[in-house]
Image: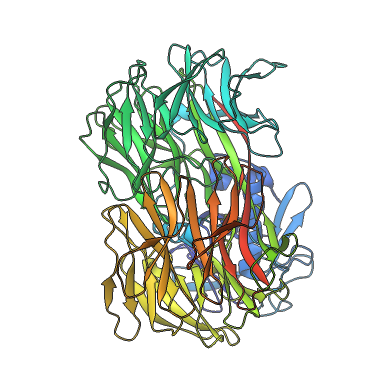
Amino acid sequence: MARRYRFDDVEIDVSNFRVLKAGNAVAIEPKALSVLIFLVENRGRLIEKRTLIDAVWNEAFVTENVLTRAIAQLRRVLGDDAKEARYIETVPTRGYRFVVRVETEEDGDAISGGSEINGRNSASSPTSSRRSSRRYTISAVVILGAAALAAIAFSVVRRRSVPDDLHILRETQLTTSDGLTLCPSFSPDATALAYSADRGKGYEIFVRQLSPGSQEVQITSDGGQNTEPAWSPDGELIAYYSHVRGGIWLIPALGGTSRKLSDFGSHPSWSRDGQWIAFQSGESSDFVSYDTGAFPPSTIWVVRPDGTGARQITELGKPEGGHGSPSWSPDGKHIVFVTSQFGDHGLWAVGADGLGLVRMVPDGPPDYDPVYSPDGKSIVYGAIVAAVNYGLWQIRISPDTSAPLGEPTQLTNSGSSVLKNLSFSSDGKKLLYVAAGTNGSLQSLPISATGEPNGEPRSLVSAEGCRIILPAFSPDGSRIAFSSCLGRAGVLTEIWVMNSDGSNAQQLTPDATAGGQSVWYPDGRHILFESGVNGRREVFLMDVDTRQQREITEFDQDAGRIALSPDGTQLAYSPSVGGVVNIWLKNLATQKTKQITFDKELLGFPMWSPNGKFLSAELKRGKSINVAILPSSGGAATQLTFGSGTRFPGGWSPDGDKIVFAELQADGYWNLWTVSRSTKTVKQLTHYTKLNAFVRSPVMSPRRDQIVYEYTESTGNIWMLEFK
């Protein structure tokens, strides 16, 4: 193999495994680069799709869509076009051909290589290219725009061939819902599965035999929005989580009367001997396709099936983040779980006695629903690696300690689908999972001068397969900045801006910038945005019109949501320290920081009032999160909303009296509300009735004519892998 390949202004540095264009290194996913190298080495030849897949992905089980995505990324990076190919020619239904003359370099000596294809050579091709303008289409985004930044740190994990004991034989789709079917669980004999689905009256638990033509049997019918069924090892009971009634419940596997096992918690998991059920103390959000477990202060607990012996296994802050998605080892000695904290995620194991904490993989990308293989020699989990590899991963472990033996290996690449809710058959020959996706948008709710709804919501921008998050109005209300693309395979986070009516959407940051959230500077000409480039959490100031930017500060830990004071002098942010989120301030002139809240549960995610005197925040007490305010200089928090449930505050009204917030109601639906700072009057604004949809980050226009917010729906179906 040559050390370098060159064509036009592109150089492939094989030795250092990178691509340079016009002398600058470009962001490219490793698999896509491997595809490019293979095509260049075989230039002039038609390379069949299967040949490419076998050469690049080796024995990993992937479908053609991963190759299609890699080719699309290469074209974007190279400035190529599928219809008028300069470099990579598509041969419909068959494969691809590299069609430009290439210069190679070996041991420092450059020689001309390749040949003219279809009359094209380096002389007839431009020496530089511009990225073609594109219509605004965007994809999956994770809360607070940090998951891809953390994923970059994890990209050092090497992908090797799949271990011999898990060669995939076939993949079968078991459900075909247009909405979200989730949480499959094998019966002990692997002849049936339990799962959660909505058949028009909310999510209930169903059981269906795997034999062809079998009909599903509804097991629960209490309107509890029931999910996460887990079959007992003897096949007699199913444990599940009730969103409406709360806690973990047990019901006979053939249906009958259910009984409450725990007043709190979710995600039940049976030990192999049936003597214990592990669960996370935090509530589940399985209706969100990218949910990774639980956020602080969730910990792992166990309880006996008769409700006795409940005890806490993990300790808050050890490790950092919320602890969720527990699963037992076959011998009952260990529990694997994930940690979640803003964009940072981890995969850990702990002894059933709470001792022997072991980190399975480096912290960074989202890891989903890990399960032990039935032989106890490995753990399989869903993950997103380097923002480009979605799929199932496996890591070898010591059966005695659960300590990892080597590095993770990839079993499947799922394109842009998140694979979660994993369940092994008892013999290890089959694996159930949900392939989940996300369809997102920014919606505009017209309002009157008094803040009342004045019509139906309409979409400003939408995208299939993604979230669009964190809208922010410019000070005069004429433009909206927002974040997109975080989580789409092969695409890093981007910051966009558009007119307040949704027109003239423009990308501000290049793909390689990995920007997170953005906020407007008081002059209305600049925005502040986060970046995770080079492993640092930096904040840049950018001129929206010229795209000129400079770094103004950085954080040594995840800042949570950042908010700029109205006078532009301070950033409010909310890191997690010791597993608890509080509010800090950072003076941009002096770079000094100051903690202003000292809550023991959660008081964070601040937003400034228009006059800068107050901060709104999330206040957690027990299982409930409510809206609170406090003086921006620090001091006691005043709670504005009350009751059980979850409420995420958004922006303020221009007069500083109302706060718009998103609320998860007892019936499981997310909707928008406002609360008055002066009277504490609460009013509902929207009336959505989809459990697999949510609203987030509402902001009111300075012009008082609309509220813009994220609206996202999750989709997914159940699939089954069979192993050789």
Q: 352 above or below 141?
A: above
Q: Residue furthest left?
A: 355
Which sits in the foreground, 56 or 445? 445
How many numbered marks, from 0 up?
A: 0
Q: 687 above or below 590?
A: above
The picture places residue 353, in percent across and down from the top left corner, at 22, 29
The picture places residue 712, in percent across and down from the top left corner, at 62, 53
The picture places residue 514, in percent across and down from the top left corner, at 49, 67
Which sits in the foreground, 441 or 607? 607
Which sits in the foreground, 49 or 689? 689
Which sits in the foreground, 115 or 704? 704
In the rendered view, does 141 fall on the left or right side of 199? left
Q: 299 above or below 240?
A: below
Q: Is residue 7 visible?
A: no
Q: How is the image coloured?
A: rainbow
Q: Quadrant of residue 360?
A: top left
Residue in the picture at 61% in, 43% down = 692
The picture places residue 339, in percent across and down from the top left corner, at 36, 46
In the rendered view, does 221 fall on the left or right side of 646? right
Q: 296 above or below 304?
A: below
In the rendered view, does 308 fall on the left or right side of 11? left
Residue in the picture at 68% in, 65% down = 444
Q: Is residue 119 visible?
A: yes
